Image: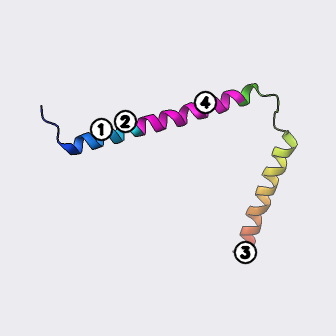
């Protein structure tokens, strides 16, 4: 069976992408796992304030239109 040089380059790119995506997935899983057991939980009031300020920014954009 014959493989041309273009196939080798494509195969190398596929391997690099698989490694990069696998690393990103593992990083994301590790981050979620660590946040699940961390002692520093986000404060609910600070999350509510962030969503309120985001809503105010949307209103400001609507007033400009």
* Residue 63 on image: x %, y %: 75, 72
From the image, state whether disc 3 or disc 4 is nearer to you: 4
Q: Which residue is mark 2?
A: 15
The residue at the point 81 percent across, 37 percent down is: 42
Q: Which residue is mark 1?
A: 11
Q: Which residue is mark 3?
A: 64
The residue at the point 73 percent across, 27 percent down is: 36
Callout 3 crowding tier (Cα within 10 Å): few <14, some 14–19, many ≥20:
few
The earlier-in-sequence mark between 4 and 1 is 1
Q: Secondary structure at mark 2?
A: helix
Magenta-tinted stretch: 17-34
Callout 2 crowding tier (Cα within 10 Å): few <14, some 14–19, many ≥20:
few
The quarter of the image holding the N terminus is top left
Callout 4 crowding tier (Cα within 10 Å): few <14, some 14–19, many ≥20:
few
Q: Which mark is residue 55?
A: none
Callout 1 crowding tier (Cα within 10 Å): few <14, some 14–19, many ≥20:
few
The earlier-in-sequence mark between 4 and 2 is 2
Query: Residue 5, located in which quarter of the rendered image?
Result: top left
Q: Is the residue under label 1 in contact with that under label 2 (CB below 8 Å)?
A: yes
Q: Is the residue under label 1 in contact with that under label 4 (CB below 8 Å)?
A: no
The residue at the point 67 percent across, 27 percent down is: 33
The residue at the point 73 percent across, 62 percent down is: 58
Task: Please say if 36 is above or below 8.
Answer: above
Q: Which mark is residue 29?
A: 4
Q: CA distance from mark 2 to mark 1?
A: 6 Å
| 25 left or right of 44 in image | left
Query: Residue 34, located in which quarter of the rendered image?
Result: top right
Residue 28 magenta-highlighted? yes
């Amino acid at each position: 069976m014959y493989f041309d040089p273009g196939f080798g380059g494509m195969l190398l790119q596929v391997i690099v992408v698989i490694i990069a995506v696998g690393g990103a997935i593992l990083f994301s899983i590790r981050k979620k796992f660590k946040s699940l057991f961390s002692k520093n939980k986000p404060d609910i009031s600070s999350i509510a304030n962030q969503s309120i300020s985001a809503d105010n920014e949307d209103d400001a954009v609507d007033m400009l239109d």
